[in-house]
Amino acid sequence: MTATTHQIRTEEGTVPVYFFAPDGQKPKSAILFYMDGLGIRQALLDMAARMASHGYAVMLPNLYYRAGGAGGDDLMQDRDRMMQLVMSVNNAGTMNDTKHLLAFLDSQPGLAGAKVACVGYCMGGALSLTAVGTYGDRITAAASLHGARLATDAPDSPHLLAPRMKGEVYVGVSEIDPYLVEGETARLDAALKDAHANATVEIYPGVQHGFTVPGIPIYDRDASEHHWDRILGLFGRNLPH
């Protein structure tokens, strides 16, 4: 596995990006990995490397660059700091970042114009769905795992983009999730069905928000491995590798 870091300029600063590629082969497609609320840490780097081991290039940007942070396990004990960092991320700003991330991808050997899938966890779930609804000609699949704010009354709520989601969509929902408002999952599911989107919404019984990511107390290995089966299948169906 080859792992490199890059500094990509945006209109609001410079976003650090961790870039992974499998050894011994040139990837034909890429995955854009939108981080969770705890931000960049070893667990996410390991997840990105696991994705890349299946033959993909993987981009993991530090979306907290506007607030001068990266995240880390210590944020589990500093909720105020975590929320300060989370508030520095919004859909519009991240979609502008994504434009630059896709341009960076075009500069990599063999990846100019390559198809992209995206996956997001926690706050990254909304970003993943927003990306597939914004860059539908380039992003061919999207996954959200225990995502928050997917179908709200906000004018930038991802569910409003359902008619523009051309690619396949997978949404994995924790049965126990305090970050979801009542009826939100049903509202998202209805929007996807009304738009005739190629989408699956799956509820993971008995697990809590954040269950997919190792290193936190609510990690559930069996449910997390199920999510790996789901997202790798999604990537395999929609990306050349």
Image (cartoon, grey):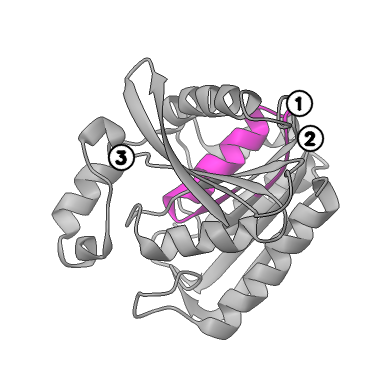
**Residue located beneath label 2 in the image:** 166
Callout 2 secondary element: loop
Disc nearer the start of the sequence (3/1): 3
Give percent across and percent down for residue 151. 54, 45
Q: Are marks 2 and 1 in contact (CB under 8 Å)?
A: yes
Q: Nearer the viewer, mark 3 or mark 2?
A: 3
- Position of residue 241 measured from the top left corner of the image (x, y, whole percent): 80, 49
Instruction: Tell me the crowding category of disc 3: few under 14, some 14 to 19, or many 20 or more residues within 10 angstroms, Cα based.
Output: many
Q: Is residue 183 visible?
A: no
Image: 237 above or below 195: below
Q: Which residues are magenta?
A: 119-142
Task: State how far apart marks 3 and 1 are (Cα).
Answer: 27 Å
* Residue 126 as seen in the image, left or right of residue 164: left
Q: Residue at x 44, y 50 (%)?
A: 35
Residue 64 has which mark? 3
The residue indicated by pointer 1 is 137
Q: Is residue 25 left or right of residue 159?
A: right
The N terminus, quarter of image: bottom right
Cα distance between the residues tagged 2 and 1: 8 Å
Disc 2 marks which amino acid?
Lys
Indicate which disc, 2 or 1, sits on the residue closer to the N terminus. Answer: 1
Taking depth in this image into account, of 88 and 148 the one nearest to the observer is: 88
Who's the residue at 34% across and 52% down the image? 39
Residue 135 among those drawn in magenta: yes
- Asked whether the viewer can see residue 187, the reply is yes
Residue 145 vertical position relative to residue 97 in the rendered view, above or below: below
Q: Amino acid at mark 1?
A: Asp
The image shows residue 141, relative to residue 10, as above or below, that is below
> Is residue 63 within the magenta segment?
no
